[in-house]
Image (cartoon, grey):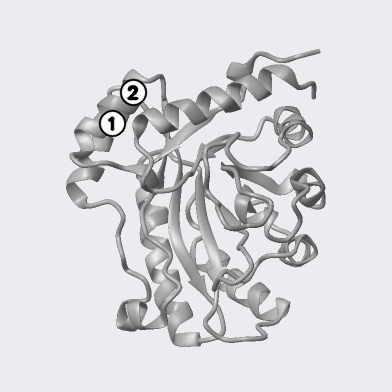
Amino acid sequence: MIRNVNETVIAASTHNIKKPFAGWLRDIHSLGFRHLDVEFFKIVDEPYVIGKNVGRLKSIDGDAVQELKHWVENNMIKVISFEAGSLLVGDDKKLRESVARIREVISIAFSFKCSIVSVTPSSFKENVSREDIVKSCRVLMDECSSYDVKLSLENGEVGSIKILRRPEDISYVIDKIASPSLGICLDVAAAATIDFNIASYISHFIDHVNIIHINDITKDLKFKNLIVGLGDVEFNSFMSLVKKHNIPLVIEIYSGYGPVDLYLCKRQVEKILQQVDC
């Protein structure tokens, strides 16, 4: 049986924000988006950029947050997830500072009645162990347990500071922490740098996936975060799993893409969802 495509939430992301923010919101709303992911903090790969601020590079300012709150309070759009940037592993001082930053985002998400906050385990050190990741995630869980928000660990791509990459490592961290408040934010293009069969990749921990950043990538890995259909990922078997588990999808594509590109990607995703069975 094919379910109604509307059962799968497809959200835009402020990763693709165009200023002024109010105009961008009107554009995506007019193109049919009713759900939004908020990229609150950027993730950067260069340690000199982070410096003393541990990546406090906001992607959205206070005025935009207030504008968005107006839209949410008037039931014009719903925020389904907040992105809180890197959880820095391997340095106790930077870990504490990044936990404080993430807790700030969790507090804001809570005020928006948003139940998902994604964080990305990252490190500038080589050979970070799985136990180091577990330890850091436990610190975060302990710090943020007072909020009714589900934390989602985002996977990383080869060659970046994002260290949770292989499906067996993701499963290990989830199993070790064993908390219903911890899940996975799957980034499709990042996963493809490890295993181009995304359905196989996600099958290792499908029951723990809270949200998916949907995008495409070429087989040679040269072009990523593309509109679905412009790369080489085979989406049918993957989308079948997404439908079965009713996992929300966030369109997170190259930041240069605008509202119309988001809409075209949404149409491609909807078409695939209509074609596949659970």
For the point 38% across and 53% down, the residue is 107
Using a 10 Å C-alpha cutoff, classify the residue at mark 2 as few (fewer than 14 neighbours), some (14 to 19) or many (20 or more).
Answer: some
- For mark 1, what is the residue? 25
Circles 2 and 1: CB atoms closer than 8 Å: yes
Is 237 situated left or right of 192 in this image?
A: right
Q: Where on the picture, by quarter, is residue 162? A: bottom right
State the SS at label 2.
helix
* Residue 127 percent coordinates (x, y): 67, 85
Q: Nearer the viewer, residue 238 or 99?
A: 238
In the rendered image, the vertical position of residue 209 relative to residue 172, given as above or below: above
The reply to whether residue 177 is in sight is yes
Q: Is residue 58 left or right of residue 20?
A: right
Q: Residue 241 location in percent, x, y?
A: 76, 34
User: At 31% from the left edge and 42% from the top edge, which residue is drawn?
Assistant: 17
Which of the numbered marks, if any, corresponds to residue 29?
Answer: 2
Identify the amino acid type marked 2.
Answer: His
For residue 187, say whether it is visible: no
- Decide: is 97 above or below 185: below
